[in-house]
Image (cartoon, coloured by chain):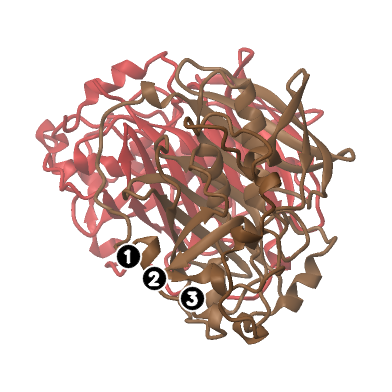
Chain colours: A red, B brown
Amino acid sequence: MAGRAEGRGSRQGGDLPPGHRDLQHPRHPAAHGRGVRPPLRARRPAARVHRRRHRGVSEDGPVSHLLDDAVASTPLGDGVHRVQVTADWHTANGTPNGGYILALLQHATLRESAHPDPLTIAVTYFRPAVPGPADIRVREVRKGRRVSTYDAVLVQDGKEIAHAVVSTHDWDAAGSVEHTPHAAPAVPRPEDCADVSALIPAGMMPILERYRYRAPTVPGWFRGEPSGSTESICWIRTSDERPVDALLAGALVDAFPPATAEIGQLASATIQLTVHYRRRPTGTVWTLGHVVARHVIAGYHDEDVELWDEDGRLIAQSRQLAILAEG
Amino acid sequence: MAGRAEGRGSRQGGDLPPGHRDLQHPRHPAAHGRGVRPPLRARRPAARVHRRRHRGVSEDGPVSHLLDDAVASTPLGDGVHRVQVTADWHTANGTPNGGYILALLQHATLRESAHPDPLTIAVTYFRPAVPGPADIRVREVRKGRRVSTYDAVLVQDGKEIAHAVVSTHDWDAAGSVEHTPHAAPAVPRPEDCADVSALIPAGMMPILERYRYRAPTVPGWFRGEPSGSTESICWIRTSDERPVDALLAGALVDAFPPATAEIGQLASATIQLTVHYRRRPTGTVWTLGHVVARHVIAGYHDEDVELWDEDGRLIAQSRQLAILAEG
């Protein structure tokens, strides 16, 4: 059942929670006869990448990034925010990646938050969003002195697409106890890793054009030879080199190929995803993801991501429960 | 800062999310001069343990268990369930353990669920519950064919205590793909492990009388010698030998001493806890918990639990983000 792109058919319009990062691939991407190709970002129309200033990260000029356009929201009052879902993060399913949906929910919620930083977000995915307008309804669950909690629902055409619980706080008011015996994986820096993105055929799916992937070695499943080990390490950055903040970190944890790809299971749909933010990211463009699925049981699998910055500091950790499309 | 029971003072009535398993201890429990003592369950009044039949687990007679009494709910209509919060799961904080709060929320939600089994539950803790009546307001977020999702809020005296998102499904309708390279930790069976509970002074706190703990070796922090390793392995069962089902599994993942005890940090309060259920437990009374805190950063720590049955099958896995009481 290696690399079965056809598996996704069973999830179209079904009731499995979708909204996801399924970086599905034909069995042998390299067999498409394209080989190494120019960096993906060269193909982005400059006008689009730069049409809107990215707020809150860049301080050195009118730099704009696609993710900020894609999560931009208009407050309609009473905690409701109008957004425009784009097709730019579509996966092989033809539906938006779950990390992008998470970013939409997180962005709108932070606009309502009493605190500046997300601490945790727990998302449940119900059905695929479609490109076009949508509303995010943010509700304050509890405002606290140190931690506040909100829920947010993405609604489109009267249907609930995804639901998030977001707790926020202020890193500047955090404590001081540190104990970090687990360091970032020891791998070469991105420039010394294999350029996985260069091996991806153009036009395969939009999400693969949003990010650049580099790995110590080209993943086995990517060569059509799944390794059997559901653990991987991969550098990732946006194609337009957006600096990493909590918004992007939330998207990134769901932007890796499913860890089950290495057992030949590429069609995986997230049901529930919890992200814990572990510090305020600063000054990093690449992040290193350590992706592990420990237990595939009855067609469900966990997937943990530890997301590290370029200096080996943990930015975020996530766990999701996902379901494989069988049959 | 080893074993600082005084640390808990900073969390009484504050705005830190409490509701938790803080198995706080005076610095040297063994120094209380009590030594080995009879099993805790011998001290339970039989009338109380057996006063109510446990529904849905036992099939061989009128056996009743305390947890079932403690989560019993009366439907008031419109998804509202009246419960009675008990002091029987109080931690050193003098407030209910988070695992018990989770069980309350899960139990009420399952009474509203279209599906029989919990798949995931994500709880955010806001403030301590107090013994006495409370309402759980369950709302259907989305009813699906395979997975349905609910939210539930525990409300007491008009204040929100804790909030849960519960997704439910039916294990009998699950898939078949299995890949389980990570086995349960190889440790002796409970009867061949150290009886940690026998070392706990009587009357220290109610939650310690709810469970029996056995470990391959007595934990270092328990002897006043924290090991510095925030990873532990421990058998646990209820004192009244309740068979494990999903309800109890949810309580158990938050019933272990905090993994940070081994770095001298005993006062830890859960902010967010996500549990993924991995199979329907059957025929097990003891479970084995593998508890790990990987990253303590700015006073926040993660804590993962893998909960295994007596036959080495994964029942549930949880992750929480918790905050240490500093100062």
- Real-space CA distance between mark 2 and mark 1, rounded to the nearest whole angstrom: 7 Å
Check the residue under mark 1 and report the chain it is in: B
Foreground mark, 1 or 3?
A: 1
Looking at the image, is mark 2 or mark 1 earlier in the sequence? 1
In front of the other: B320 or A79: B320
Marker disc for residue B219: 3
Q: Quadrant of the N terminus of chain A?
A: top left
What residue is shown with label 2? B216
Specify whether A318 is left or right of A202. Answer: right
Residue A214 appearing in the image: yes
Looking at the image, is mark 1 or mark 3 earlier in the sequence? 1
Q: Is residue A224 above or below residue B306?
A: above
Q: Quadrant of residue B231?
A: bottom left
Specify whether A166 is left or right of A311. Answer: right
What residue is shown with label 1? B188
Dots 2 and 1: beta carbons under 8 Å?
A: yes
